[in-house]
């Protein structure tokens, strides 16, 4: 998977390429990332990439031409087609299924907006999709793209030391899109609180059932909308439904 990023802050992605799981995978060549600064494609002394909005108003708007030139260079360098995705508040909200689709693809070209936004003509002519991290505003698309890429890279084959690890993550289909169950490690007793006895039983079927019930309990408490989605998708078993009913009983 190759990722290209149009950004004014190229150093911001070193965290992904040099640290942790994603950094190790990058070092192994399992994925690659290349940044393109629109300032490198302008010729005026101030390397201008933004200007005042027509019609007035606060802030500045990213100019279309520097972005278009940077995008053209990225496309030539890739020597292959790739979707162009703009990080924007009005975009499709990113989720685990989108991360999985990206992980299974050959990559994409991401455009990180700044200031008040991007000239609409660039969006209309060049952008294929728009993605959003959620219903809030951050200082630039870079801050939204970092967790998106991390979520995708860790799903790629060979990235995780234990490939089964991500299958029990929250929102994964193996959990019917529910939150993950609690986890415990040593010491066995901490400040007088012991880990649940079931986890020491060695009975894998019962442990699996306990984890499923804990997942259902946490999801009902914190994200009941996910319970509704799983139910609508036919992903809850009869045993799941009985357990959920017991949680609501007085």
Image (cartoon, helix red, strand yellow):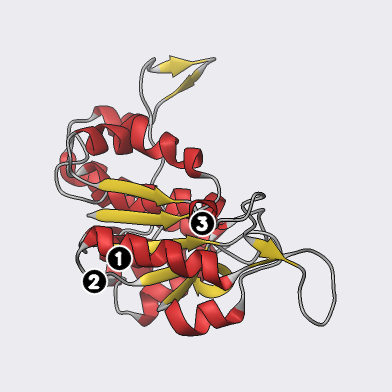
Locate residue 7, reporting x and y percent: 50, 53
Secondary structure type for disc 2:
loop
* Quarter residue 25 falls in: top left
Disc on the earlier residue, 2 or 1: 1
> How many C-alpha atoms fall within 10 Å of the one at disc 3: few (<14), some, or many (≥20)?
many
Locate residue 135, reporting x and y percent: 63, 67
Q: Can residue 93 be spotted in the picture?
A: no
Secondary structure type for disc 3:
helix
Q: Is residue 124 above or below residue 96?
A: below
Residue at position x 39%, y 39% in the image: 16
Residue at position x 37%, y 67% in the image: 72
> How many C-alpha atoms fall within 10 Å of the one at disc 1: few (<14), some, or many (≥20)?
some
Q: Can residue 64 be spotted in the picture?
A: yes
Q: Are marks 3 and 1 in contact (CB under 8 Å)?
A: no
Say which residue label 3 marks. 38
Q: Nearer the viewer, residue 93 or 78?
A: 78
Say which residue label 2 marks. 81
Q: Nearer the viewer, residue 169 or 95?
A: 95
Disc on the earlier residue, 3 or 2: 3
Q: Is residue 57 above or below residue 77?
A: below
- Mark count: 3
Residue at position x 43%, y 35% in the image: 15
Q: Are marks 2 and 1 in contact (CB under 8 Å)?
A: yes
Distance (Cα) linking label 3 and label 2:
20 Å
In the rendered structure, find residue 75 and report the number of the disc placed on it: 1
């Amino acid at each position: 998977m190759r990722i290209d990023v149009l950004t004014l802050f190229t150093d911001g992605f070193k965290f992904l390429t040099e640290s942790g799981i994603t950094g190790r995978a990058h070092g192994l060549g399992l994925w690659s990332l290349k940044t393109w600064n629109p300032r490198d494609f302008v010729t005026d002394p101030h390397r201008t990439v933004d200007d005042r909005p027509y019609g007035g108003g606060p802030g500045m708007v990213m100019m279309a031409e520097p972005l278009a030139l940077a995008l053209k260079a990225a496309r030539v360098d890739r020597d292959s087609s790739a979707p162009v995705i703009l990080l924007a508040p009005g975009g499709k909200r990113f989720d685990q299924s989108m991360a999985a689709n990206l992980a299974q693809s050959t990559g994409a070209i991401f455009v990180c907006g700044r200031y008040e936004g991007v000239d609409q003509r660039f969006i209309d002519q060049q952008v294929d999709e728009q993605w959003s991290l959620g219903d809030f505003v951050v200082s630039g698309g870079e801050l939204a793209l970092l967790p998106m890429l991390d979520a995708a890279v860790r799903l790629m084959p060979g990235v995780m030391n234990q490939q089964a690890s991500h299958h029990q993550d929250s929102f994964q289909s193996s959990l019917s899109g529910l939150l993950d169950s609690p986890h415990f490690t040593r010491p066995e007793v901490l400040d007088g609180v012991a880990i649940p006895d079931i986890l020491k039983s060695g009975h894998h079927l019962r442990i699996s059932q306990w984890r499923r019930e804990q997942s259902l309990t946490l999801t009902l408490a914190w994200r009941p909308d996910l319970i509704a989605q799983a139910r609508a998708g036919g992903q809850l078993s009869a045993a799941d439904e009985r357990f959920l009913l017991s949680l609501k009983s007085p």
